Image (cartoon, grey):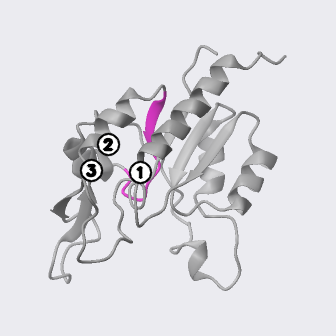
Amino acid sequence: MTEQPLLLIDVDGPLNPYAAKAHRRPEGYTTHRMRPTGWEQPYQKPLRVWLNHDHGAHLTALPYTLIWATTWAHEANDWIGPHLGLPELPVITWPKDRPASSPYWKAEPRVFWKTATIVEYAAGRPFAWIDDDITDLDREYVTAHHDGPALLHHIDPRLGLLPADFEALTAWAASLATEEPTR
């Protein structure tokens, strides 16, 4: 395989373990106060974001083309990337008519609202996607609608990316390099 797979990166959950205990920052993370779009007044306090500065080096060392796949959109390049030492990354643009909430806030499980756009963006290219909202329904959707290899890797939003996640991403990319080309 000559082209690197895409790594589609969500911010909240994988990079910002927002679901950790509110007054207990996870080990290795630093607290940042941010005011991205939508977080201006009437909110009194800036948004608390926990980031592990080692993640930038770990992400750039992976054999992937890095892409933001986050509701932070282009603001991930302004607010998140610089703290991690990441270069400006391409951004997946979400449809304006997307649902406002996660499938977990609904009575019935369903495919995550990002999934169809992820598949469309990948356009058959191999990709790994790290997000805290991935379920088996999303994996089934990708299997049915994506023509290339894909790894949908769920990240616990209480823990963020861990060494085992980087190992899994590395191993998956290495497995692509050893696959026989199909015609």
Q: Name the residue under label 1.
A: 161
Q: Classify mark 3: helix, strand or loop.
A: loop
Mark 1–mark 2 CB contact (< 8 Å): yes
Q: Name the residue under label 3.
A: 52
Q: In which quarter of the image is the C terminus?
A: top right
Residue 111, image x, y percentages: 68, 65
Mark 1–mark 3 CB contact (< 8 Å): yes
Q: Which mark is on residue 55?
A: 2
User: Nearest the camera: 137 or 77?
Assistant: 137
Which residue does the image show at 65% across and 45% down from the upper left? 119
- Magenta residues? 64-73
Residue 44 shown left or right of residue 147 in the figure: left
Residue 42, image x, y percentages: 20, 84
Q: In which quarter of the image is the N terminus?
A: top right
Q: Earlier in the sequence, mark 1 or mark 3?
A: 3
Q: Which mark is on residue 68?
A: none
Q: Which amino acid does label 2 sit on?
A: His
Q: Quadrant of residue 114?
A: bottom right
Q: Classify mark 1: helix, strand or loop.
A: loop
